[in-house]
Amino acid sequence: MCGIIGIASSSPNKDRDWLITGRDAMAHRGPDDAGLWWSADNQICLGHRRLAIIDLSPAGHQPMQDAAGSFTIVFNGEIYNYRELRRELIAMGHTFCSHSDTEVILAAYREWGVDCLTRLNGVFAFALYDISQQTLFIARDRAGEKPLFYWLAGGELRFASELKGLMADPTFPRRIDPEALDLYLSMGYVPGNRCMMQGVKKLPPAHALLFNLTSSSVRIWRYWQLPEPPSPGRADRWDEQGLLDELEILLEDAVRLQLVADVPVGVLLSGGVDSSLITAMAVRASSQVRTFTVGFPGFSKYDESEHARLIARHFGTDHIELNAGDVAPDLLPVLARQYDEPMVDSSMIPTYLVSQLVRQHCTVALGGDGGDELFGGYAHYSRLLWTNKQFEWVPSILRKFIAYSAGAILPAGFKGRNWLQSLSCDLNHSLPMIAAFFDDAMRHKLMSNAVGGSWPLVAEGVWGSRIPAVDNLLQRATRMEFENYMAEDILVKVDRASMLNSLELRAPMLDYRIIEFAFGQVPSSLKTTVSNRKILLKRLAARLLPPEFDQQRKQGFSIPLAEWLKISPWRDYFHEILLDERCLFDKKAIYGLIRGQDKGRNNQERLFGLVLFELWRREYQVSL
């Protein structure tokens, strides 16, 4: 992958220095090359840091122009079907000077204009300047694997792959958006086009933006969306074997495309269903496949090496087992600096460590991200179905009373509290916030000192506005997860952690054809039931994986944070950050969370989220 940055203005721009600083603040995204291009009228500047993956020669340098000098592009990502598109465009009369996928985007834009997006199968965030139209065309991939932040004011548009690129300008305003912070404290991330930094926005996944330099006008549109769910009336016509066959074909082709690179490629093999299926497909496409597993010495509960070893032996891969070693809390400031917006997900730690270790062996790695969201793998899906079945006949007034009582009586971190609070939700039309970190009352307590008693409690309303309007409960839940948790947590975590180590992580499960298949063709009954999950993928696993493979094992990518917080230095570090007088959060509320953690409640992620936010705020000198 790479890092991109730029500015487009309705008038000549004189402030240039920050662009070079901002570009190089993202050097980890592209250590192999750097470029900067200014238009003759000084209204456009495009900057690039390159991690060379396809066409390692200087011909792949960016910013890249077409032969006529009509278009200039900076591109972060990979177009997996670029070879097929290149052949199609050559047949239409286009010529190429390189073997890069970047040049294919330029030719595709010349041929199809902004509609070229529908032709691209890949992960991307790019900005393309069209000199004749005086427009800057910006787009982001369908699932949101590649990031893009932008700031628009005074007839000027600025953008960057990472927020730190924009913040390289010393005059850039550094204030927290209170509504974004409320969302963070509730959901653990800031969803949609919002950003923790006031005045900044994120281009959402599957969206494009067109900025006109002449009029300073902006048009933003969605160019792709999830298909309609399969009709319940087709239940008698569902062909399970046909669906399995189609999934196998799609996954095999996605892995084949994503193995293409001019640098060493590996597979992250945890030994779970998703990564094992990726491995099975990789050995079909390549005679030499390298697989990697990472363990944490001293914590056998998190050791997956035995399961990965089984798959590696069965498929004959060149298997490498890596050990992460001891993890100290001084890693947290490094991660807080890298994650442009803080996020409540301590699995960023093992994700970073895995990326760091794998990068010593290869530049590209394939993983299993997306399987749970697409095919119903999370345990709470089954629990949602069970809750709906058990409580749909309970009067609404009684369910609301139970939910209110749970919130008022039970402390944060008490097992089952969020589920009891969710009983007030109408599961026939809505979704509960079962993964909420802080409810509205707790958020008000946390922020009471910082804002003098008033706080914008917007998270519940924003959550409700983002719930997909589909009748089926499981479709509603998985679509919500795909467009929110996966896009704003999982993919952000993977992108920032891997790119900090200059490693490109690819997710074949998120090939848009598989996404459309999963949401448009696979019935809920072949995804999740009250007693089983990820049904169709497991049946594919039974077809392709060794018979002794344990399909029911579900090991999340996590760390023993609760155990670490019982001892130094982690416990002392968390106390030092959160009880410091500079901490934004109410001390009484913090003490309550710490005491609850000491009593065995599950507050470790809540405390992690508060610590990471404080470290981020101090690193970038951001105020409320």
Image (cartoon, grey):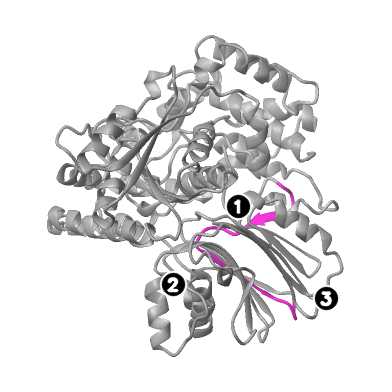
Amino acid type of the residue tagged 2 in the rendering: Thr
Report the disc number at residue 390: none
Disc 3 to disc 2, C-alpha distance: 32 Å
Report which quarter residue 157 is drawn in: bottom right
Q: Which residue is painted at 75% across and 29% down in the image? A: 584
* Labels 3 and 2 touching (C-beta < 8 A): no
Amino acid type of the residue tagged 3 in the rendering: Ser
The secondary element bearing badge 3 is classed as loop
Magenta-colored span? 197-215
Check if residue 201 falls in the magenta segment.
yes
Residue 252 seen in this snapshot: yes
Q: Earlier in the sequence, mark 3 or mark 1?
A: 3
Q: Which residue is mark 2?
A: 118
Amino acid type of the residue tagged 1 in the rendering: Arg
Q: Position of residue 273 (x, y in %)?
A: 28, 40
**In front here: 451 or 75?**
75
Report the disc number at residue 11: 3
